[in-house]
Amino acid sequence: MLIRMIRKMDIFGQPINLNLDLRSKYQTFLGGLVSMFIVFLLIGYSVNEIIGYTIQRGIQITQETKFNYDPDVLVLNNKNFIFAIRVEQENFYQFPQFDIQVRQHQNNNEVSLELQQCTFQQFINVLNSSQVLDFLEANQVDTWLCPKSEFTIELEGTPFSKRIASSFSNLVIEISECKSKSSWGSECQTRTLKDSYKLQMITKNTFINPFNNEFVAEDYLDNSMSLYFQPGDLQRIDYQFHKHITKDYQGQIKIEGLLDEQEWSIFSTNTFKQIYEGKNNAVWSRIVFMRSNFSTNYNREYQTVTDLLSKIGGLSQSVISIVGVIITYYNRAQCNQQSSILVYLDISNRLYDYDFNIEHDQGTKGSGLVDPLHFSVQLHQDSSQPLKKKRKTQDKADTIKQPDEDSMEEDPQFKERVMKVVEEQKQIMDQYQFKSRKHFLLATFQQTILMKKSIQLSLKYFFQKLFCQKPDPKEDPHLYVLSKALTSVRQELDVFSILNRIHQLEKLKKILLDRDQLILFNYSPKPVIAVNEKDKETDFLHYSKQQSLKQMTLIEVAEEIKKQLKTTFLTKEHLSIENVFNSYKAIAAKNRKSNRYYYKINRKLKQFLGDQVKAIFKASKLLRFPEDEQIPEMGVLEIMSVGGETAAQYPLSMRPSVNINQQYQ
């Protein structure tokens, strides 16, 4: 009871279904092709993802942009930033017409940054690229002004945060007229009169590419910052620097202390703010570097094993689900419309033979070797009827004399029939050259199997089903037989039909077999599936074969096995097996007394073999083979009575008795 309750709790139970050809599912060629395509697609995708995982190609980016009224500090120094500035004129560094001053504003304090002539080394310390050097040479870097080799610039807060907090820092660059000496120590030159002058700047900027595995940030020199100013008018330009932070998570767990974090300062020349501040004779242009309110964080996570498996599994589920719905619908439609017909047709070709003849011919068809003998067999059966009646009359008489065969042979009609049979035998033997009865049987059965007909579907069948037409057996017998075969298979596959036939078999067992036979029938040995090709047998049958070597009878074998069982512990199985041996012993005794009952059953079985098989056996008994020369010649009565109720079983009559040794050979 407990085991039964536990079994009912199994959530992994599998449905029990019928199957055909060891298959429980209907599968189509299209489904197989699509399945192969999906398999190859998933294999290619999986290999590509695995390769990308090994080289850390797959990166997941999470971008987060924050706004702050009081942004934190952004530090620029000679290691991460450089800028160069000049006014467009000839030999500006040595003979400047304008003075440039750079001041760091920190709250209410001002700190001046000294300028010097730009050198290649200052740029190489920040950017190391051959293209940068070419760019500097083309722009005559020695005519530009750069901050000292060691400098630090802090950008923090905004003008609004200055009111609510004490932290505010920015960088201010002012251009004014050079009077005697410039801030870098060069002698001033008289200004050339123009309506406007051009201020040029070169700054180091950074381009962020978070999806690039090798180069997340690329530095470059930006010379797009330029403006025109007029003496006496103050123009102000504000450039805002954004802080960008990239965080690379290398492991499975995000821990702030175990990640690679880099900070970048980036400004966009497209987002500057230009303001006109009116007339001013002291300062004509002002450039302000300040901190932006926005900060952007890039969280770069390399693909992990779990991510890899989830991507592969997700794609697999998606493809199988989407394509599976289409293919399943196709297979279901095929199975409901055509494939069920194909399955039924396959079963029909295995179960039935077909006859497409409109007129029902008597006799056997389908074997070219048997057909020539069909007429002679019918002749012998007809001629054997008076002989049978005469034998019955002689059996009723109280005489021991044998039938007068000589008087029968003198009958001219009888002689003519016998001569015709002999002539037919000679013609068949000359034509086919059979060496033995075994050769004849093998040839005829082989030809019979090869000539088995099968039926195939046709478009005409579907058109008739489409227009609800019934096939006419006279116009198209093939189509009529096809429809009839499919209907028969559907009826036989019906559950009620199957159960009804099982009940009928149980009834037949009870009707045809007595109690002892039923016991032996129910306890027949089971086939054993073994490693060897030849299946093993049960212990009882094996023991019987071993004992048969001693020339023991059936009853003696049963007694010996029964004695062995008595020496063991008697269980319910042993007691039931004892009943089996008792029944076996009783049936063996009946065999000795009479086999009339078994003969009737065998005769019924022969009738179930069919006309064609019976005709082959009858033909094999009519023909004479070279091996028959060693056996005494059969009488005319025996030849003429083949296939009838009193047919002479000549090969069996030659055997004296059947013992246990002969039974199993």
Image (tube, rainbow, N blue to C red):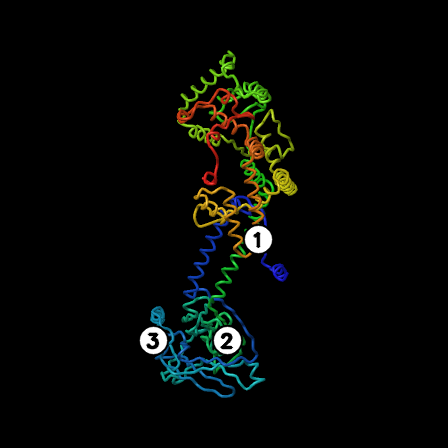
Along the polypeptide, which appears first: circle 2 or circle 1? Answer: 2
Camera sees residue 380: yes
Amino acid bearing label 1:
Glu
- Image coordinates of residue 573 in percent, x first then y, are 57, 53
User: Comparing marks 2 and 1, which lies closer to the viewer?
Assistant: 1
- The alpha-carbon separation of the residues under discs 2 and 3 comes to 27 Å
Residue 573 marker: 1
Residue at 54% from the left image edge and 40% from the top image edge: 588
Name the quadrant containing residue 434.
Answer: top left
Q: In the drawing, does residue 576 fall left or right of residue 544?
A: right
Task: Tell me if residue 185 comes above or below residue 598 in the rendering.
Answer: below
Tag 3: Cα neighbours inside 10 Å, few (<14), some, or many (≥20)? few
Q: Secondary structure at mark 1?
A: helix
Q: Which residue is mark 3?
A: 120
Q: Residue at x 56, y 84 (%)?
A: 162
- The residue beneath circle 2 is 240
Residue 458 showing in the rendered view: no
Q: For the residue marked with disc 3, what is the amino acid?
A: Phe
Above or below, 528 relative to 383:
below
Question: Which quadrant of the rendered structure holds the N terminus?
Answer: bottom right
The quarter of the image holding the C terminus is top left
In the rendered structure, the answer to whether residue 608 lies left or right of residue 194 reads right
Residue placed most toward the observer, 375 or 204: 375
Q: Position of residue 233 (x, y in %)?
A: 50, 78
Q: Position of residue 29 (x, y in %)?
A: 51, 44
Q: CA distance from mark 3 to mark 1?
A: 104 Å
